[in-house]
Amino acid sequence: MANNEDKFKKIIAHAKEYGFVFQSSEIYDGLAATYDYGQYGVELKNNIKDYWWRSMVQRHENIVGLDAAIFMHPTTWKASGHVDAFNDPMIDNKDSKKRYRADVLVEDYIVKIEAKIQKEVTKAAKRFGETFDEKQFLTTNPRVLENQKKIEDIKKRLYSAMDEERLDDIKTLIEDLGIVCPMSGSRNWTDVRQFNLMFSTEMGSLSEGANKIYLRPETAQGIFVNYLNIQKTGRMRIPFGIAQIGKAFRNEIVARQFIFRMREFEQMEMQFFVRPGEELKWFEYWKEQRMQWHLNMGIPETEYRFHEHDKLAHYANAAFDIEFNFPIGFKELEGIHSRTDFDLKSHQEYSGKKIQYFDAELNDSYVPFVVETSLGLDRTFLAVLSYAYNEEKLDDGSERVVMKIPPFLAPIKAAILPLVKKDGLPEKAIEIFNSLKNDYMCFYEEKDSIGKRYRRQDAIGTPYCITVDHQTTEDNTVTIRERDTMKQDRIGIDKIGSVISQRLKSNI
Ligand code: ATP
């Protein structure tokens, strides 16, 4: 296949053409970084959710579910740090219309001065040879000293302006340094504004005195604020987990990567509450478990890798990502974070409610530590789609696009197809459809040649096509065609259900 960018474009086009993913409000030219899941997309998405829920909740006696509201008390986001700690100063270039983190622009400028100093060092080292004393050079060379002083002054101005939120001063600094937009090369900047990734809206009518509330940027906080409710009513004993699937919203600045980075997306998160001091043991456990979950889909190991965070968030003491080999490169699919007791402690402080666990074995009370697994549902969907998309040349010289979606996740499990639209074949096929529809998502179609119908099922990833032909009316047998091998077997109608069930099971 052509290069990866090409492949990405093809996947996006295929996803649209076959009813997996549409741009939101497309008839109005769409809304940036928001997407709708079509008739097959919603099935695949539901199957991924179901796979996650079963393996996290159903198969763990100590993990339970939750479905918390998207709107939460505004103090939640003070306690979590989202209101203050996740605020970034942003600036736009009026010519390129590109938005930048203002502090990053200044820091990039500093990196350039540092490079100049390094150049002086390399030059001098060459000139003085063996006798070169780098330390002495750095502390005495006038040009180096001048540049170092420059860096210090810039840092002082930047950090004090950031700490005191003097946004005008950050802009003046950018202007004084003559920083240009890397895209347009111009110095035509807007003012610096604080930019928070949270969407806000008002609750209540204006006359009542409206209250600013946020659309949650992560589902995790719904779990933390329900910790006491669930621990008490579920009589949960540590270690235990709470799992949730739900929408999250972030006003992303860079949002041009299809469903990889959206402004409205869905997360599947699990917070696991453990004894203080045992968090790193559980962190290792969940790291391995989560990787295994991905591999159990049947996508090869080479498509995944771990990535350790260099810079930890303010709440974490260990963090790894599971990255997937998307057509846009290896990128984060899931985060596994050891969040310490930061969130529960903070909610305890802000709410004034005691969030403690009495550990009967230790005869001691404590605020539990948390290990979380945080997976993007849409990114998992994109991973499956990227892996599944295959263009094949067939022996007869023709081509097909086949979506090799793991069969247990496929939107449609079986297509029931009468060979022709007469001789009682459609009636027989509908009978079969009705006998299977309670157990499997099935599809019935009688239009077009059987070859065309097979191709359409290949394109949406249907693992089995059941064809009713003239022999069916004689001996009650049908053919079952496998999507990947295109091999056909003849089986009795009474066996269809059990054959599908057996083949689906052998795949997980
Ligand atoms: P990134 O670094 O890619 O912005 P993040 O580190 O901010 O991601 P987390 O806050 O750890 O992401 O969120 C957990 C998971 O939620 C991510 O691993 C990802 O799968 C998903 N996710 C986060 N932001 C988005 C988004 N804008 N669109 C789709 N999925 C997202």
Image (tube, rainbow, N blue to C red):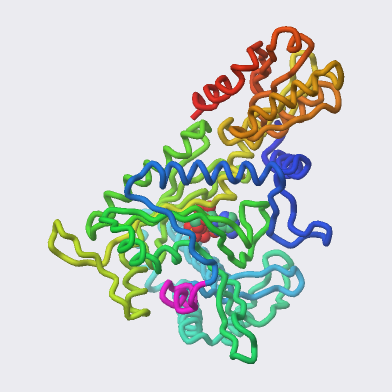
Instruction: Give left or right: position of 125 versus 364.
Output: right
Please say whether residue 443 is visible from this viewpoint. yes
Q: Main secondary structure of the magenta part?
A: loop
Q: Quadrant of the N terminus?
A: top right
Residue lying at 49% horizontally and 39% vertically, measured from the top left:
304
Q: Which residues are magenta?
A: 72-84
Across the whole image, how many numbered discs are drawn on residues?
0
The quadrant in which residue 249 appears is bottom right
Residue 98 x %, y %: 70, 68
**474, 278: nearer the viewer:** 474
- Compared to residue 260, the image places residue 422 above or below, namely above
Please say whether residue 143 is visible from this viewpoint. no
The quadrant in which residue 275 appears is bottom left
**129, 204: nearer the viewer:** 204
Check residue 76 for magenta coloring: yes
Check residue 289 for magenta coloring: no
Residue lying at 48% horizontally and 87% vertically, measured from the top left:
164
Residue 376 x %, y %: 53, 52
- Compared to residue 501, the image places residue 247 above or below, namely below
- Compared to residue 283, the image places residue 164 above or below, namely below
**169, 77: nearer the viewer:** 77
Residue 32 x %, y %: 72, 61
**234, 54: nearer the viewer:** 234
Residue 271 x %, y %: 38, 57
Residue lying at 70% horizontally and 73% vertically, measured from the top left:
93
Instruction: Give left or right: position of 441 versus 123.
Output: right
- Compared to residue 449, the image places residue 258 above or below, namely below
Residue lying at 56% horizontally and 84% vertically, measured from the top left:
211
